[in-house]
Amino acid sequence: MSVPAKYRAIGDFHEYYSGKSVAPYLTLFAGGNHEASNHLWELFYGGWVAPNIYYLGAANVVNLGPLRIAGLSGIWAGPDYRKPHFERLPYDMNELKSAYHVREFDTRKLLQIRHQVDVGISHDWPWKVEWEGDWKQLFRFKPHFESDAKSGRLGSRAARYLMDRLRPRYWFAAHLHCKYSAVVSYDQEANSNSEKMDVEKMPSSDRAQEVQKTHEIDLDDNMDRSRQREGPDSSADIRNDDEIDLDMDDDAPIVSKPTLAPKPLTQDSGATLGEKNEVSAELRDQLPAAFSRPISAPTPTLTHPETITNKTTHFLSLDKCLLRRKFLQLLDVDPVSTSSDSSPSQDSRLAYDKEWLAITRVFRSINPLTSPIPRDAGEAHYRPLIEAEEAWVQENLVSTNKMAIPENFEITAPVYDPSVGLHPTEHPREYTNPQTVAFCEMLGIENFFTATEEEREARRTDAEPISKDGRSRGNFRGRGRGFGGRGGDGGRGRGRGRGRGFR
C-alpha cells in the first residue's frame, strides 16, 4: 500500500475480511491510490474483498437489478497509460505507485460498450469535469486546484473519455477530498466535448507535464486534521496532479492566485500550452528519422451508439469519511433505459453483464501482465467479434442461469494478528484467488493471475531483505523492491506475518 511509514496504522478493514464485522449494505468500489494493490491484483476481473463488499476490478460492468454499473479503477498517469500491468510482488517503490495507475487496455474494453449504462464509478475525477460545476467556489475552497485545472492536469483523461462515451445518468468519483457536483450535457453531437486518449498524440507540452509527475497529487492527512482545527474553509496544499501527498509540509505557505474564467472545453483545450517550446516543422525536418514523431494508421471507428440515449450526466464527488465532512449522500437511481440487449435483471442480486462478458472474451488472448499490449484495432474491428461472443454468453451462461455473481468470498491469507504488528521481517506472499479461478473457468479464458509456488518463492527469495521501516531498497533482478500488502492506513489492514497485513 502506498503510504509513508509515519502514517501506517491498522484500520478496521481486517474485521470485515475476517468476518468479525459484516458490511450492513452491499458496497461496490473502484480501486484508488491508497489500496492494498497486491490484493486487488488477485481480483483483476472483480470480486469480493469481504462479505458484502465487492471490488469492481480494473474495469467492469455489472448489473444490480435493472441498473448497469460501470467501474474503472486507478488514477491517471500518462507515462504508464499504455503499459501492461507489469507489477508483481515484491513491489519496488516505483511499482508500488504505478500499480494503481489506469491502463489503456482496461479503458479500451469499456469503450466497446454500446448499450446504455446507468452509473459510472471511478476513483479519479473525469478530466475537466470541474469546469462544468461551480468552479469558482471550488477554487475558493481548494485554491491549489486552479493551476492544475487550467493546465489540464487535474483529473483522469481516461475517465473523461469513458464518461463522454457511456453517458451514464450518474458518475461518482472521489480522490480529491471534497464534495463537488457538476452537470455534463450531451445535447450536441457525440464526442463534441471529448478528447480521445492517445498519449502519443497529446501536445508535446502535455506529454512533458505527464512525465514530470514525480509526486502524483496527495492531500495530506495532517492537512485534513489541520483543516478541522482551522475551520471548514481552510484548504490543503495541492502540488501537482491527482494524488494525495502524505508527506506534504503542513507549514508550507499557501498563495492564492486570482481566478480567471476558464477557456471553453474543446478538443483543442490545452493545445496552446507551451507553444513557444514547440520545435518548428523546418527544424524537425532536418533531424534524423529516429527523432520523427510516430505516425499511426487511423483506427476504424463507428458512430456513437444510438442505444446510448442519455443526454445529461450528474457528477458527484464526496469528501473523506471524517467528522464534519460531507462524505454521504443518498440518491434514488432509476435506470435510463428499460430495454437493452444486456438484459439487466429485476433481481436485486449482483449479476454479470452479458455485453461485458462478451467483451472480456474478445480480449482473452491478450495477457494484461506482459508487454507489449497490442494497439487498439478500432471499434469497427471489435464489434463483430463482440457480437459473436454475445451469442456464446447467451447460450452458455444466460440460458443456463449462470449470470448471478456468486457470493464466494474466501479468506486467502491469515487475518491480522496484533502480535505481529506493522513491522514485518519478510516480503508479502502472492496468492491465487479462487474467485478469479472460478470466473476464468466460467468464461473459458486463461487465468493470467496465478503462478506456481516455486515461481512465487523464487521472486521472494531473490528480493532484498526488508529494512526496519518495511522497505527493501536493494535490487531485485535489476530493480529495487519495496513493500506492498494487505493493510495500512485507511483500513486495508489484513495480515499476519505473510498474510493480509501492511508490508
Image: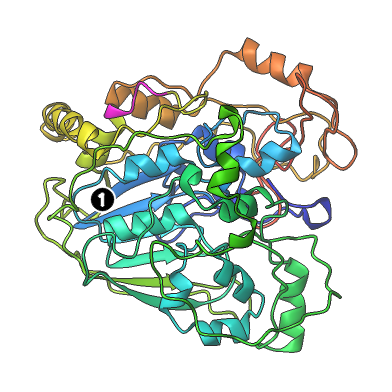
Magenta stretch encompasses residue 249: no
Of 339 and 416, which appears nearest the observer?
339
Question: Where does the image place residue 350, in percent across and percent down from the top left?
Answer: 29, 49
Q: Which residue is mark 1?
A: 63
Asked whether residue 484 appears in the rendered view, the answer is: no
Q: How is the image coloured?
A: rainbow
Judge by depth and name the residue closer to the eye, 198 or 126: 198
Q: Quadrant of the N terminus?
A: top right
Secondary element at image label 1: strand
**Location of residue 59 (image quadrant):** top left
Q: Quadrant of residue 297?
A: top left
Q: Position of residue 479 (x, y in %)?
A: 76, 26
Q: Outermost residue toward the right?
A: 468
Q: Residue at x 67, y 75 (%)?
A: 144
Q: Which residues are magenta?
A: 362-366
Nearer the observer, 374 or 410 = 374
